[in-house]
Amino acid sequence: MLVPDDLHYTESHEWVSVKDGLATVGITDFAQHELGDIVFLELPEIGAKVSAGEPCGIIEAVKSAEDLNSPVSGKVEEKNQDAEDSPEIVNKSPYEDGWLYRVQLSNTDELENLLTAQEYSKLIEG
């Protein structure tokens, strides 16, 4: 499974990339593979406040529906409308085109609670 080195990860299979205090959030390649064909996304609205570890959206696949948990706290600045309109993009490109939303971080210390690529790789390898 692809696990990019430059990201932070959660045990619930979300990833975070941070640049200039803005966090981009998505789900991992492992998560999209486990879910199967993603058919619906409900992403947090622009301006919404999200909290680390709390549900902020829904991901529905053919075989199940899962909460999307925010890995970080802050205010949603942007959501990926292309992914909401065409959820299969997350299956095809979970780390590039299939990002889900962007958050202005309210607490950068929360990043220390996330997993490194090496720690996440160990988690998914069981």
Image: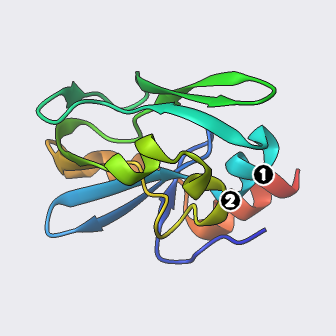
Residue indicated by mark 2: 29
Q: Residue at x 81, y 26 (%)?
A: 63
Q: Secondary structure at mark 1?
A: helix
Q: Nearer the viewer, residue 12 or 114?
A: 12
Residue at the outermost front position = 85
Q: Is 6 positioned to the left or the right of 122 in the image? A: left
Q: Residue at x 27, y 56 (%)?
A: 23
Q: Nearer the viewer, residue 38 or 86?
A: 86
Q: Residue at x 11, y 32 (%)?
A: 47
- Residue 126, disc: none
Q: Is 29 positioned to the left or the right of 16 in the image? A: right
Mark 2 Cα shell of 10 Å, populated few (<14), some (14-19), many (≥20): many
Q: Is residue 7 above or below residue 80?
A: below
Q: Is 103 positioned to the left or the right of 101 in the image? A: left
Residue indicated by mark 1: 33
C-alpha distance separating marks 2 and 1: 6 Å
Residue 95 percent across, percent down from the top left = 52, 66
Q: Is residue 12 above or below residue 117?
A: above
Residue 115 percent across, percent down from the top left = 55, 55
Q: Residue at x 41, y 41 (%)?
A: 71
The type of residue carrying mark 1 is: His
Residue 19 percent across, percent down from the top left = 22, 70
The type of residue carrying mark 2 is: Asp
Mark 1 Cα shell of 10 Å, populated few (<14), some (14-19), many (≥20): some
Q: Secondary structure at mark 2?
A: helix
Mark 2 and mark 1 in contact? Answer it, CB < 8 Å.
Answer: yes
